[in-house]
Image (cartoon, rainbow, N blue to C red):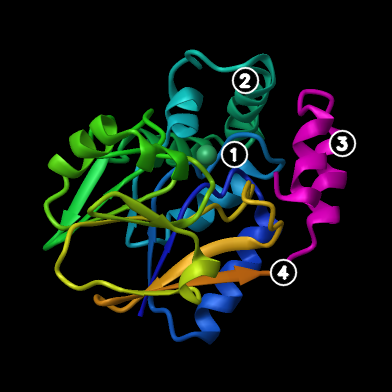
Amino acid sequence: MIAILSDIHSNLEALQAVLKDAAAQGVDMYYCLGDVVGYGPNPRECLEQAMGFAITILGNHDQAALFDPKDFNPTAERATYWTRDQIDAPVRNRQAADRRWEFLSELPTTHRIGDVQLVHGSPANPLHEYVFPEDVYNQRKMDRIFGLIKRYCFVGHTHVPGVFTEPHAFYSPDEIDHTYELDGRKTLCNVGSVGQPRDGDRRACYVLFDGKTVRFRRVEYDCDATAQKIYAFPDLDRFLGDRLRTGR
Ligand code: ZN
């Protein structure tokens, strides 16, 4: 069984809860669709975990930590510079910091296994394009994206889980009983966010995948503990902690 997860965003409590849940579901392989870091209080610890995953894709926040944040709002930008310092620390262990930077710098922007493509944002613009549920009303955008999908594509980036199909429709996990069977038709699946869900459900989100069936999982974790850590760092906007409690 494979777990596909995305947008951990330096939230160690959420990641640990997901890893525990996944292990109990028989997961023996992890694919991560990017944004391991950014926003949250534990970038180092989350990166160390991601190093054990079979595949990790580069996300826009991972890239911003590596280079310079582009088109980020002030909150995200400050968090990015703080994240960068954290990845570098502590100075007494240079080797560990180098290993983290090397891991980040070698992440691919896309990966394909047979019929399955993995990207952070969209197949058209792997790092930066959002595909939101309401985009199903934008025929031209969806045509362009589906034109680039070979068969199945898994994404993150919006932090809103669900399944996009042709002709253009979107199904939230609740609408499909948290399960979707891939049937050969082109499908775009957003796996949601581990560390900063934005669909109104504050629980960590990820999917189980056995090559045919996608199962959306929601996992309770101690979001108050994560929020308290965020509040303790002046460079991390309080809003970043508040939103974990509401899932928005
Ligand atoms: Zn993200």
SS class of the residue under badge 1? loop
Q: Mark 1 = which residue?
A: 93
Quadrant housing residue 179 = bottom left
Q: Mark 3 = which residue?
A: 231
* Separation of marks 2 and 4 at Cα, in angstroms: 29 Å
* Separation of marks 1 and 2 at Cα, in angstroms: 20 Å
Closer to the chain start, of discs 1 and 2, is: 2
* Separation of marks 3 and 1 at Cα, in angstroms: 26 Å
The residue type indicated by label 2 comes to: Tyr
Q: Mark 4 = which residue?
A: 220
Quadrant housing residue 116 = bottom left
Closer to the chain start, of discs 4 and 1, is: 1
- Residue at image x 69%, y 52%? 200
* Separation of marks 2 and 3 at Cα, in angstroms: 17 Å
- From the top left corner, tell me how far across and down residue 192 is, in percent: 51, 54
Quadrant housing residue 85 = top right
Give the magenta part as a residue range.
221-248
CB contact under 8 Å: marks 2 and 4: no
- In the image: residue 139, left or right of residue 241: left
Q: Mark 2 = which residue?
A: 81
Label 2 vs label 3, nearer the camera: 3
- Residue at image x 27%, y 40%? 108
- Residue at image x 61%, y 69%? 218
Foreground: 50 or 115? 115
The residue type indicated by label 1 comes to: Asn
SS class of the residue under badge 4? loop
Is the CB of mark 2 within 8 Å of ligand 1? no
- From the top left corner, tell me how far across and down residue 10 is, in percent: 62, 45
Density class for disc 1 (Cα within 10 Å; few <14, some 14-19, many ≥20) is few
